[in-house]
Amino acid sequence: MIEGLASNFSDKEDALQYYTALHHGVDYFVTRNIFDYKTALGSFPISTTEEFLSALG
């Protein structure tokens, strides 16, 4: 949680969601606005709903 608050994310809510996902080892991160996560570390794919569903099949 402290990582999210100390991060370069402009929106701290996005930072907290991202770092929570990171610490829980998620495989994918799905969001309406991938541009909010431009400072993400790249540990898992970040995609829109449409991109995620398209990748499934």
Image (cartoon, helix red, strand yellow):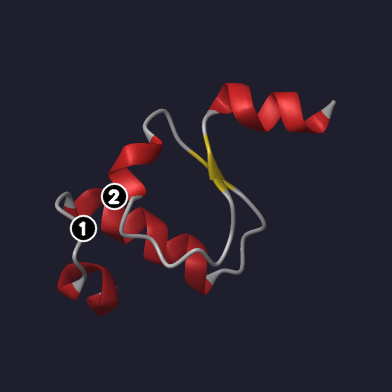
**Residue pictured at 50% horizontal, 63% vertical:** 42
According to the picture, the residue beneath numbered tag 2 turns out to be 14
Q: Of the residues shown, which amino acid type is indicated by label 2?
A: Asp
Q: Nearer the viewer, residue 4 or 39?
A: 39
Residue 21 higher or lower than 14, as above or below: below
- The reply to whether callout 1 and callout 2 are in contact (CB within 8 Å) is yes
Q: Any mark on residue 9, and which?
A: 1
Measure the C-alpha gap from mark 1 to mark 2: 7 Å
| Residue 48 on image: x %, y % | 52, 30
Q: Quadrant of the N terminus?
A: bottom left
| Residue 49 on image: x %, y % | 57, 26
Q: Is residue 10 left or right of residue 57?
A: left
**Residue pictured at 35% horizontal, 49% vertical:** 37
Q: Of the residues shown, which amino acid type is indicated by label 1?
A: Phe
Q: Nearer the viewer, residue 48 or 1?
A: 48
Residue 17 higher or lower than 56, as above or below: below
| Residue 9 on image: x %, y % | 21, 58
Q: Quadrant of the C terminus?
A: top right
**Residue pictured at 33% horizontal, 51% vertical:** 38
Earlier in the chain: of badge 1 and badge 2, it is 1
At label 2, counting other C-alpha atoms closer than 10 Å, the crowd grade (few under 14, some 14-19, many 20 or more) is: some
Quadrant of the image occupied by residue 25? bottom right
Residue 46 higher or lower than 7, as above or below: above
Report the number of numbered marks: 2
**Residue pictured at 40% horizontal, 58% vertical:** 18
Q: Is disc 2 placed on a helix, strand or loop? A: helix
Q: Is disc 1 placed on a helix, strand or loop? A: loop
